[in-house]
Image (spheres, rainbow, N blue to C red):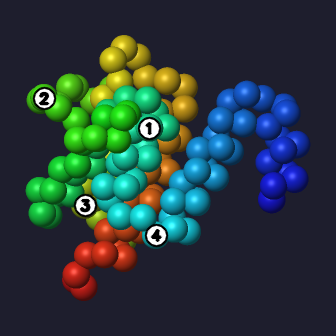
Amino acid sequence: MEALAVRLSGLDAYVDGVLRIVAFYDTLMRRRVDLPALARASAGLAECVAGIRLHGTGQTIRVSPEGTAAAGPPAPASTSAPLTLDDEEIGRVWLERPGPPNPLDEVLLDRLAIAAAAAVERYAPAR
């Protein structure tokens, strides 16, 4: 897989970015990180506030790029994605980026949503 990634990354900077994001979240999932760790890692990678909200519990996690709890009221999300588990929307993930979204923000949020769903399934009480 790594050899393929190296060959593809030489073709296009966007493809290289996508592959790096996928590898980043694959590593986090293998390490079985929890939701706060996912939010911290995502905020650092995106270089803006990242958030995760679970509808059922109302739990909201907002983290600054420095890895600390985001201060102040939430800014409007520049990009967001549903957090789904078993085809049910259980929450949302988002980035609070000043200005327009970056080209890779959708990929980042897609991978964050997948990793967050796995963490919820792993750490939540049985349904």
* 1 and 3 marks in contact (CB < 8 Å): no
Helix, strand or loop under label 3: strand
Q: Residue at x 20, y 26 (%)?
A: 75
Mark 1 burial class by Cα count in 10 Å: few <14, some 14-19, many 20+: some
Q: Is residue 18 above or below residue 32?
A: above
Which residue position holds label 3? 90
Q: Residue at x 36, y 76 (%)?
A: 122
The amino acid sitting under disc 1 is: Gly
- Which mark is on residue 77? none
Q: Is residue 20 above or below residue 119?
A: above
Q: Quick one: quadrant of the N terminus?
A: bottom right
C-alpha separation, residue under disc 1 versus residue under disc 3: 24 Å
Which residue position holds label 4? 32
Comparing 43 with 52, the one in front is 43
Of tags 2 and 3, the one toward the viewer is 2
The amino acid sitting under disc 3 is: Ile
First in sequence: mark 4 vs mark 3: 4
Q: Residue 106, position in %: x, y?
A: 48, 37
- Which mark is on residue 44? 1
- Which mark is on residue 72? 2
C-alpha separation, residue under disc 2 versus residue under disc 3: 25 Å
Whether residue 24 is visible here, answered yes or no, is yes
C-alpha separation, residue under disc 1 versus residue under disc 2: 18 Å
Whether residue 92 is visible here, answered yes or no, is no
Comparing 43 with 79, the one in front is 43
The amino acid sitting under disc 2 is: Gly
Helix, strand or loop under label 2: loop
Comparing 118 with 41, the one in front is 41
